[in-house]
């Protein structure tokens, strides 16, 4: 069972290659493939939450010190368990009395 077990309403898989782009003073671009590994991550959003439920997402984020520590997460896209960490901040949003959270994971 995955460490991250909070409800998820929306999952988006992010696939990217590692390319470095350098722009020269004359406007010419140079692109270089840093490695052939595909970088994969996930953008996620919770369902509508109460204020207390939204706090559980914030508590999970802070318990893992944001981007610092690894944990497991099962993607609903392919039912595979991945070792991930947070990628950037978590957003807790509120509108008309409803709360939800948005965040990203990156594979380790």
Image: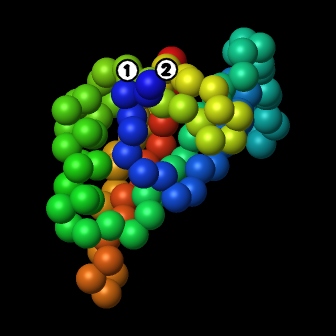
Residue shown at the point (26%, 59%) measured from the top left:
54
Q: Can residue 22 be seen in this view?
A: no
Residue shown at the point (27%, 40%) measured from the top left:
61
Instruction: Tell me the colour scheme of the image.
Output: rainbow
Which residue is label 1 attached to? 70
Q: Quadrant of residue 15 in the image?
A: top right
The 10 Å Cα crowd at callout 1, few under 14, some 14 to 19, many 20 or more, is: some
Q: Residue 31 at x, y = what percent?
A: 79, 27
Between 73 and 33, the one lying in front of the other is 73
User: Please, is residue 7 above or below residue 17 in the view?
Assistant: below
Between 79 and 55, the one lying in front of the other is 79
Residue shown at the point (79%, 28%) measured from the top left:
30
Between 19 and 71, the one lying in front of the other is 71
Which residue is label 2 attached to? 83
- Label 2 with label 1: CB-CB less than 8 Å: yes
Which image quarter holds the N terminus?
top left
Query: Circle 2 — which element?
Result: strand
User: Please, is residue 89 above or below residue 93 in the view?
Assistant: above
Residue shown at the point (72%, 15%) measured from the top left:
37
């Amino acid at each position: 069972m995955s460490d991250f077990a909070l409800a998820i309403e929306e999952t988006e898989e992010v696939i990217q290659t590692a390319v470095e782009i350098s722009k020269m003073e004359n406007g010419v671009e140079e692109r270089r493939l840093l490695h052939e590994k595909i970088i994969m991550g996930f953008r996620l959003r919770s369902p509508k939450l109460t204020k207390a439920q939204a706090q559980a997402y914030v508590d999970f984020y802070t318990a893992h010190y944001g981007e610092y520590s690894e944990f497991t997460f099962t993607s609903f896209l392919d039912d595979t368990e991945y070792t991930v960490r947070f990628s950037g901040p978590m957003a807790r949003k509120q509108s008309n009395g409803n709360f939800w959270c948005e965040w990203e994971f990156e594979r380790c």
